Amino acid sequence: MEHRWKKRCIVSMNVVVCFQQGQEVPGVVRDMSGDGMFIEVRPWPGLVNSGVVIELPGSGTLHGWVVRIDDEGIGIMFRVLDQGERQLLTQLIDEKMSA
């Protein structure tokens, strides 16, 4: 069942996913929306419901948690984003939608 409330945009953006155990895993964002994103990572060493920080090189960070794991990567749902994170996410989506 889809839980997405906002329209997603297709992207290809390199990120680093950091999770609670202190590990960092490189990945590529495949799509994103105001609610979350799908990141291609293989293998994913964490668990569903793991808290993560997504580092967007040169842009900033976003906080979320893993809501889905499949053979291609992980689905992230954003936690309550602060104003700076919300602005960053809005800017990234606007840039990708107008490209």
Image (cartoon, rainbow, N blue to C red):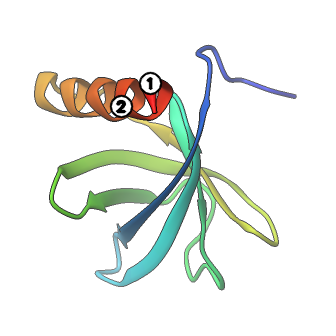
Query: What residue is rendered at 41% in x and 56% in y?
Result: 51
Amino acid identity at mark 2: Glu
How far across and down, in percent of the image, does residue 86 sit?
25, 25
Residue lying furthest right: 1
The residue lying at 38 percent from left, 59 percent from top is: 52
Tag 2 residue: 95
**Would residue 31 be found to the left or right of residue 13 on screen?**
right
Q: Is 86 on the left-hand or right-hand side of 38?
A: left
How far apart marks 2 and 1 lie (CA) works out to 5 Å
Furthest residue toward top: 5
The relative height of residue 90 versus residue 89 in the rendered view (above or below) is: above
> Between residues 44 and 49, which one lies in front from this camera angle?
44
In the rendered image, which quarter is residue 93 located in?
top left
| Residue 46 image position (x, y, % from top left) | 55, 75
Relative horizontal placement of residue 58, taking residue 67 as reference (left or right): left
- Helix, strand or loop at disc 2? helix
Q: Nearer the viewer, residue 50 or 72?
A: 72
Q: Which residue is mark 1?
A: 98
Residue 2's place in the image compared with 25, above or below, is: above
Circle 2 residues within 10 Å: few <14, some 14–19, many ≥20: few
Residue type at the position of mark 1 = Ser
Picture quarter with the N terminus: top right
Whether tag 2 and tag 1 are in contact, CB under 8 A, the answer is yes
Q: Is residue 99 left or right of residue 80?
A: right
Residue 83 screen position, x and y as percent:
14, 22
Choose top left, top right, bottom left or bottom right for residue 87.
top left
Other residues around mark 1 within 10 Å, as few (<14) / some (14–19) / many (≥20): few
Q: Position of residue 14 (x, y in %)?
A: 41, 67
Seen at 61% across and 78% down, the residue is 44
